[in-house]
């Protein structure tokens, strides 16, 4: 021990043992909470990512649904529309004379009915 | 202490809660001393030491030389303490050499003594303050102080010698003034 030592005990945080123990506990609690905080954030980001993908898929399905339903209602018209004219004429030749509407449907979107 | 620190840091990095607690118990007071030498207020130094220790132990993987953990920690504490001073200056807050402990029922004699010691420490350089506090309060050897403050042992002894002389002079003058006025 050094006799020249200056007495700094008034500044010693360990002077108040209970208070110092509380300081240690608070510091440890702070470290634990910040250590737990990082994985929580990552997990949260993963959850948000999954939700966003699911929402986007649902929106795409909703947007696509009217088209699907329309296609289901008039299969002949949609089959005709946009098909190759040569194929159509050869098909008419095999099956007989087409109705009045079929050639118009095949040529464009005119509603003749 | 360095070899022990290396083991403790490795254990704490791998999530060993007991090692973390030993590091906190071992370094909270030295961190407080370093903070005190910058902020010069016991209450502020406690806050700074806690925050700095929390921050340092949370990013322990950034400590490249675990055998020099103390030096790495003290650098973090000093940065935190200087930032704290800057923020306080920006906020225009009063230097808390008025102690918040006054509200926490610390006896008036202790508060007076603290004020006197802090006022005397003001007369020293930051390194002198750290050396004298680490040596006389924390009871570290010159080898430990030199390693943690990145100075030579000879300089540590020199700082201690000068610091004690200045402190004694100031405290003696202070005491004389008080007795003359009292």
Image: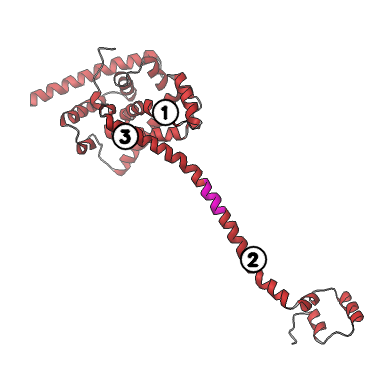
Q: Nearer the viewer, residue B56 or A99?
A: A99
Which residue is label 2 attached to?
A61
Which residue is label 3 attached to?
A22
C-alpha distance separating marks 1 and 2: 56 Å
Q: Number of labelled discs?
A: 3
C-alpha distance separating marks 1 and 3: 21 Å
Is residue B82 at all visible to an observer of this figure?
no
Which residue is label 1 attached to?
B73
C-alpha distance separating marks 2 and 3: 57 Å
Give the vertical position of B141 relative to B94 (above or below): above
Label 2 Cα crowd, 10 Å radius (few <14 / some 14-19 / many 20+)? few
Image point (91%, 81%), residue name: A93
Which mark, residue B151? Answer: none
Q: Are marks 1 and 2 on the same chain?
A: no
Where residue B20 sits: x, y (%)? 43, 30
Image point (31%, 16%), residue name: B160
Q: Closer to the camera: disc 1 or disc 2? A: 2
Image point (16%, 31%), residue name: B108
């Amino acid at each position: 021990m050094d006799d020249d030592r200056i007495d700094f005990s008034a500044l010693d945080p360990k002077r108040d043992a209970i208070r110092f123990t509380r300081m240690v506990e608070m510091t440890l609690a702070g470290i634990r909470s910040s250590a737990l905080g990082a994985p929580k954030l990552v997990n949260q980001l993963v959850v948000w990512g999954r939700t966003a993908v699911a929402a986007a898929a649902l929106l795409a399905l909703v947007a696509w649904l009217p088209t699907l339903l329309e296609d289901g209602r008039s299969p002949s018209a949609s089959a005709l529309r946009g098909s190759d004219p040569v194929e159509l004429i050869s098909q008419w030749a095999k099956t007989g004379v087409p109705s009045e509407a079929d050639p118009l449907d095949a040529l464009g979107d005119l509603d003749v009915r | 202490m360095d070899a022990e620190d290396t083991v403790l840091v490795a254990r704490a990095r791998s999530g060993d809660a007991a090692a973390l607690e030993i590091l906190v118990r071992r370094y909270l007071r030295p961190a407080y001393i370093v903070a005190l030498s910058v902020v010069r207020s016991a209450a502020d130094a406690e806050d700074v030491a806690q925050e700095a220790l929390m921050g340092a132990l949370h990013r322990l993987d950034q400590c490249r030389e675990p055998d020099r953990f103390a030096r790495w920690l003290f650098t973090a504490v000093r940065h935190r303490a200087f930032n704290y001073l800057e923020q306080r200056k920006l906020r225009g807050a009063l230097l808390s050499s008025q102690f918040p402990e006054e509200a926490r029922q610390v006896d008036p004699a202790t508060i007076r003594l603290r004020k006197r010691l802090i006022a005397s420490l003001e007369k020293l350089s930051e390194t002198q303050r750290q050396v004298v506090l680490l040596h006389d309060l924390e009871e570290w050897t010159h080898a430990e102080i030199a390693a943690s403050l990145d100075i030579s042992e000879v300089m540590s002894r020199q700082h201690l010698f000068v610091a004690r002389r200045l402190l004694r002079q100031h405290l003696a003058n202070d005491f004389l003034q008080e007795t003359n006025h009292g």
